[in-house]
Image: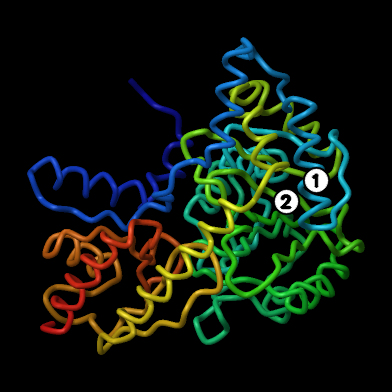
Amino acid sequence: MILANRLDRIEVPQTIKMAKLGRALMAQGKDVINLSLGEPDFDTPDHIIKAANEAMANGFTRYTPVSGLPDAKQAICTKLKRDNNLDYSIDEIIISTGAKQSLANAVLCIVNPGDEVIIPTPYWVTYKGLIDLAEGNTVEVNCPAENGFKIKPEQLEAAITDKTKLFMFSSPCNPSGAVYSHEELAALVTVFEKYPHVNILSDEIYEYINYVGKHVSIAEFPSIKDRVMVVNGLSKGFAMTGWRLGYLVGPKELVAACDEIQGQITSGANSITQKATIAALTQSLEPTLAMQADYKKRRDFVVAELQSIPGIKLEAPQGAYYVFPNVTSFFGKHGVESSLDFAMYLLNNIYVSTVAGEAFGNSNCIRISYAASMEQLVEAMDRIKKLLNAY
């Protein structure tokens, strides 16, 4: 069978590759600790499960509108007003099968072959994959640790050309945990105001996992709101990874275009999950806030353990549930010449699965998820410390 050429433009994400390698070792009987995937170890809160059960008991198991149930979209509107002081109508919202599909919808509706898309590095692996799938050109802007892994206004302006169509970023950021403040976003907005041909795609899936204060969305700036698309979902903040629901809010014409794309691929998202979404977004956030507090404890533990290892360079992340330590001091020994080699060294020697920084556009670091249980994190840090202290 001769496959389509577009497959040459994309590759399996390193996060999935590392998880697969870890599962292969587990099948051999190895005690693998998986710190490669960003999946909460918490159970979905009870009130959300109750809403799903009620939906099923009431026979709510049929197709939904492509863009989502009106009452689920209204719940998103309520959440946006309550948490972000953002006013959107239901025709400015589309619900999808996960935030990844929301991102894909937006990129496929915005980017033409040859268009340039600016992404600050490090970035989530899927961003570049989606740009490649749309046959756009990725413009990576290096954002080093000394700048908090955040893009500076002068870097943004230097990267913009007549071919720039889109700017993609996340806050809180996967993999670095960087969180943009109101002042930092305002400085970027000043640049965007000069270039009305540039659209902005803001991935805010980690909104509720923020250790430095209230979340700020770039959509809060009126001067550019008509060019901003915000993507969010339930997987991270509500421990609902398997429920598969994300959403995009933005200009009506963009949402209508996403509706056309989605209608040819998946149609409407899961009916039961949409009913559960109403409970998640309009009822108590106490379980979500409790998870956030627990993540902070895990972060503090992992950061302290890693900082105690000579050669590891790391500052505490401001959000999400990853650390992104610099491991370049370990290059040049034991066959380790890159962060990918280093990640494989950990996997093969102590059975701890992480992800190489190359996958995120930064070859100096590795990503470690602390969404695992504290018991697993204690064991993983003990293994890493013993291995690297004898390196």
- Above or below: residue 352 compared with residue 212: above
Kindly give the residue lying farthest to the bottom in the view shown. 310
Residue depicted at 69% across the width and 56% down the height: 202
386 and 378: which one is in front? 378
Is 80 positioned to the left or the right of 362 in the image?
right
Dot 2 or dot 1: first in sequence order is: 2
Residue matched to label 1: 250
Distance from disc 2 to disc 1, alpha carbons, whole Å, reads: 7 Å
> Do tag 2 and tag 1 residues touch (Cβ < 8 Å)?
yes
Q: Which kind of residue does numbered mark 2 sit on?
A: Val
Identify the disc placed on residue 358. Answer: none
In the rendered image, residue 343, in percent from the top left (x then y), is placed at 25, 65
Tag 1's secondary structure? loop
Please tell me whether residue 241 is drawn above or below residue 192 in the rendered image.
Answer: above
**Label 2 secondary element:** strand
In this rendering, would 132 be left or right of 252? left
The C terminus sits in image quarter: bottom left
What x and y, as percent, mark residue 301?
A: 36, 75
Identity of the residue furthest to the right in this view:
223
Pointer 2 local density, CA inside 10 Å: few below 14, some 14–19, many at least 20: many
Q: Identify which residue is drawn at 14% across, 64% down.
A: 350
**What's the residue at 53%, 37% (across, down)?**
46
How far across and down, in percent of the image, does residue 280 sit? 64, 40
Q: 373 or 367, which is in the foreground?
A: 373
Q: Is residue 390 above or below residue 378?
A: below
What's under tag 1, amino acid-wise? Gly
Residue 374 left/right relative to 336: right
User: Which residue bears the numbered disc 2?
Assistant: 230
Judged left or right of residue 163, residue 296 is left
In the depicted view, which residue is nearer to us: 82 or 100?
Answer: 82
